[in-house]
Amino acid sequence: MSGNWGYVIAAWVIVFGGLGGYSVRTILRGRSISKQVPPEKRRWS
Amino acid sequence: MTTQLDAAPEGLDSTGSRATRVLGVLAILSLAVLALFGLILSPPDASQGEVVRILYVHVPSATFAYIGCFLTTIGSAMFLWRRSAWWELVAYASAEIATVFTAIVLVTGMIWGRPTWGVYWVWDARLTSTTMLLLLLLGYLAVRRLPADHDVRTKRSAIIGLLLVPNVIIVRQSVQWWRTLHQKPTLLANGVGAKIEGLMLFSLFIGFIAIGLVFAWLLIHRFRLAWLEDQLDDAGLDAAIAERRAEGDRS
Amino acid sequence: MIRDALLIAGKDLRLELRSRVALNQVLPFALLVLVLFAFALDPDKSVLTEATPGLYWIAVLFSALLALQRSFAIEATDGNRDALRLSGLDPAGIFLGKVLAVSVQLIVLEALLGVGVVVLYTSRIDGWVLLAVTSVIATASIAAAGTLYGVLAAGLRVRETLLPLLLLPVLAPVLIGSTRAFEAALNGSPSEGWPWVGLMSIFASLYVVAGIFGFGPLLEES
């Protein structure tokens, strides 16, 4: 049964990695597009 | 209409704000607690062994994938009914996040399945429905991201978004009937139905909290990003029109 | 609304009678799919016979995609869509008319294909009532959902690749239901098939209603 730790770790790495990667991508795109948009239009209004 | 929570420390050059910082810190903390309880403090399952730990992230991800779908449908409905651009952005952001979560559900489900069933894939109700969910979401995203006029994209994707939850319900029901009405006596035991209690139940509970906080954090950021993208598209359109006018003046 | 529907259905069907696209291209395509399945699966083992209902409905689904694309292609020429919008016809009627026209073409296709299936796959036929009702309901479902998503995709440059992506996942329950119902009919246990017909009826109702309300706004700006 303890041989299955590999699967557990793989799954958790995918979850954390996937969510983390998506988060980073979202933040970075937010920063890059923010620069291209005039300041008064950057937030919902 | 920016409130205190919307205030961004760096002068608005990112999608962050006080609210997202607080949320982000809480999310990371709860993920740490989840790892502590899920991987270390909670015991292995009597029948599944260590792999039950995968469920502490798999199940909450599935839950929030479906919550994302509901938000997309509600947002689409509000957009079509009240022309609320705010709700349209919520719908779009939720759909994309739900897609990421659904992909995670599929992969972790397959990883859970390998030691449990011996194979990576079975055509059981849950995995099949999740795959269909992914396809339906990809359809919505494809339309929302079309290289077409903003109004055209948003209205058409909203109709798809509106039908998303009804479609999901009908697909899930038909797949469920399909896989259970003629169940041969081989035990493809869906281990999630097994009794779960004590520290294991607590770990699952923490899982919901942690994944939920991540979902909320992502939703706010993705919403703001979607708004920025739309602004950029508008700016692009304005620039193109200005150019056209300049050409007209010249000739 | 009904009058407009019959008007549109009549127009589309007359167009088909004159151009015979469905007859000359869609029907052979459906037969082709069946033959290809025979190549892909081994006809000497029982695989083909067991899978017959499923293969039949897959052939119908793929053919329906062609028929739906055609249904909107005829509107794309010579500003037909503008003419349609300005004609003062009730959009819900236009929707129902198009659904009716596509349904008629599909029913004819299914009947002919059924003959092909019996011949090519040497199947027995039983449970006629279930088979017939299933065909009607499944056809209505495919036509209604297909016409709604069809008008959504119409007028976009990516419509050929978009429509299958949107429509096939949505129609999965219809594929599951019609196949199970056909299997029940052919296996002599029709009572197992009727619940599936019920599910598909709900599906068809949902999409007819959605189409009646959604077709107008979508037609406006395509």
Image (cartoon, helix red, strand yellow):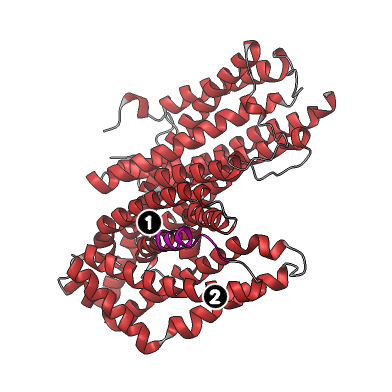
In this picture, residue A3 sits left or right of residue A24:
right
Judged from the image, the secondary structure of the residue bearing numbered disc 1 is helix
Amino acid carrying label 1: it is: Asp
Locate residue C98, reporting x and y percent. 31, 70
| Image coordinates for residue C166, horizontal then vertical, percent | 46, 58
Q: Circle 2 — which element?
A: helix
Q: Quadrant of the N terminus of chain B?
A: top left
Residue bearing mark 1: B233
Closer to us: B184 or A40: B184
Seen at 69% across and 65% down, the residue is C48
Q: Which mark is residue C87?
A: none
**Residue topped by disc 2:** C115
Q: Chain of mark 1?
A: B
Q: Quadrant of residue C151?
A: bottom left
How many numbered marks appear?
2
Q: What is the magenta segment's predominant secondary structure?
A: helix
Q: Mark 1 packing: few (<14 Cα in 10 Å), some, or many (20+)?
A: some
Residue farthest to the left, as pictured? C88
Between A24 and B169, the one nearer to me in the picture: B169
Chain letter behind tag 2: C
Magenta range is C125-137
